[in-house]
Image (cartoon, helix red, strand yellow):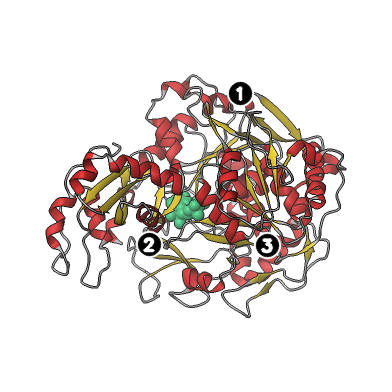
Amino acid sequence: MKENLESVMHEQRSFVPPQEFRDAATLTADKLQAMQCAATDDLAAFWADLARKNLEWKQPFIQALDDSNPPFFKWFADGRLNACYNALDRHLEGNGGKTALIFETDEGEILYFSFRALHGEVCRLANALKALEVRKGDRVVIYLPMGPQALISMLACARIGAIHSVVFGGFSADSLKDRIRDAGARLVITADAAPRGGRVTMLKETVDLALAAGCESVKKVIVYRRTGVKTEWIEGRDITWDDSLNGQSSDCEPEWVESEHPLFLLYTSGSTGKPKGVQHSTAGYLLGAMTSMQWVFDLKPNDIFWCTADVGWITGHSYVCYGPLLNGLTQVLFEGVPTYPDAHRFWRMIEEHRVSIFYTAPTAIRALMRLGDALPRKHDLSSLRLLGTVGEPINPEAWTWYHRVIGGSRCPIVDTWWQTETGAAMIAPIPGVVATKPGSCTFPLPGIAVDIIDEQGEPVTSPNQGGFLVVTKPWPAMVRTIWGDDARFRKTYFGQFGDRVYVTGDGAHRDEDGYVWILGRIDDVLNVSGHRLGTAEIESALAAHPRVAEAGVVGRPHEIKGEAVLAFVVVKGDRNQAIRDGLAAELREWVGTQIGAIAKPDEIRLVDGLPKTRSGKIMRRLLRTIGRGEAITQDTSTLENAAILGQLTAPAAPGSAP
Ligand code: PRX
């Protein structure tokens, strides 16, 4: 784990929340302390109280936490509610006319949706889904561009108790097929195409390919015509969004589901090849998304919130779809990318829509920082009062730039640590109370019991000593299981330290002041631009190519993306011939079609063998060292084939990407 220790360890600066921010903050030091005490006294009662105050129940619950069968915890299990009702209906009286969404398309067109308008559309689609025989508990895969239709689709599923599974629009037909099959989806909602950064991705084409590969469970495909581009049409299976909504009523009685009813599945990478369908509950998840937002973003009714994440990721679920709507906020929703039509885009949008809270990823901050201060300085960013980051550790240089240039040294930065599996932010500063340090996500939120432990499961007590980041008590928004695979769920997250200790897969340490610093993944998972990629997944995609014998994939530090993907590939047959054929470039594209563009290796080295232990395990630690261009100091005496090391450090094979 030591090799992961980064320079952030030496960061000493601390930023106290500005007086003005503290004076206006909802959560004060006293209130926060009272909450922490209440959570320590009786964790279940603490959350139960919040669940009663924050959520609307059709049938109130009596039991807060059922922990009789760990690691399968249940929260508020005897209550009934509906996620869509909580997100929309309850705002209609009094706030129905309030703007829920300010949607800006890739081309710059702006559309507004009030809570009432959104409610009407959601109900019509919910009725359409019912007409297409989607029932409570059925799975619906959503493969749409970032936009109102994605949110409408998620909420329509929630309204009728169907389980949504959003697949990011950048995933390939193969990845989509795997997810559709694993979920056993009954229906797919897609669009003809997705405009993004001036380019167009053909979504429907990808869906057709995925379904042609055999997804018998899918009976219908709803196609939203986003661009009007011509696509194949399968009569009887495909139906346009407009046709499905046509004649449907904008009233739809919500399906009142049990608290533990699955609200959604979201597939994520693990350290083995097959993506995991992370299953979230209804009530516990909603409570986590809602309360974490109130605390971490110090919400005020007039805030204009903008989270730049795509709904294909958990951040888009919790802080684009559910969190903002549950809290009745106005938010900006953006279809495009930060650099199109030019790198002013984010700053221009903040200025134009008077955004007050801006939440984005370190990779975007680093990319925009590289372009200099002049761009953001051309814009009036004075509406901002709070900034956030998520997805990967933020380096202090990017943090301070974000703070100074974007936040005008006036906005606190909330660095929020969490995961697809945690459902909501777990470790993050309360902005009006906690002094921040660049690169630290500070302290766990109320009701979240986090610890850092060593290999024996003992808490690490000395400051700055690294250990496993674990959560020692259940929390409402936690993952419930891996879809269809309870055993894998138990083994992945609870295997190491018993059935009550959730293992995050991250390493961390605390400094002298108790601040938590995340050191990154300790398993074979990469974090590329804030997206999780399993090395095993990329390795098995490479190995599926007819000319590949085996592959070893590692990450290496990358200035903008955080981590870049480096693949060592053993080819079948003559390596020199493979180099001459430009196989490396071909394999990059191959991974793109197998998984999706995000997983394309940045560099591929064609080699004759991989460093292995005598038991045949690939020594990834060694590959990592080689990938970083560092001298090998590890003991290589246990290597089966030490002679291969010279070849691995050779420069990139011709044809591989820079
Ligand atoms: O390694 C941590 C990193 O992202 C992982 C979770 O990835 P995912 O499930 O895709 O969710 C990302 C968005 C919540 C974590 O295990 N990570 C996330 N946030 C931070 C972070 N690393 C450091 N600091 C963060 N704020």
Residue reaching furthest to the bottom: 68
Whichever of callouts 3 and 1 sits on the residue coming sooner in the sequence is: 1
- Quadrant for the N terminus in the image: bottom left
Report helix, strand or loop for mark 2: loop
Q: What percent of the width, then of the height, locates residue 88?
A: 77, 46
On-image quarter of the C terminus: top left
Where is residue 635? Give x, y as percent: 15, 65
Residue lying at 45% horizontally and 44% vertically, measured from the top left: 593
Q: Position of residue 626 (x, y in %)?
A: 21, 52
Mark 2 belongs to which amino acid? Asp
Can you see residue 529?
Answer: no
Give the label on residue 108, or none: 1
Classify mark 1: residues with Cα within 10 Å, few (<14), some (14-19) or many (20+): some
Which residue position is annotated with label 2?
A: 523
| Residue 262: assigned label | 3
The reply to whether callout 2 and callout 1 are in contact (CB within 8 Å) is: no
Disc 1 C-beta below 8 A from ligand 1? no
Upstream in the sequence, badge 2 or badge 1? 1
Q: Secondary structure at mark 3?
A: loop
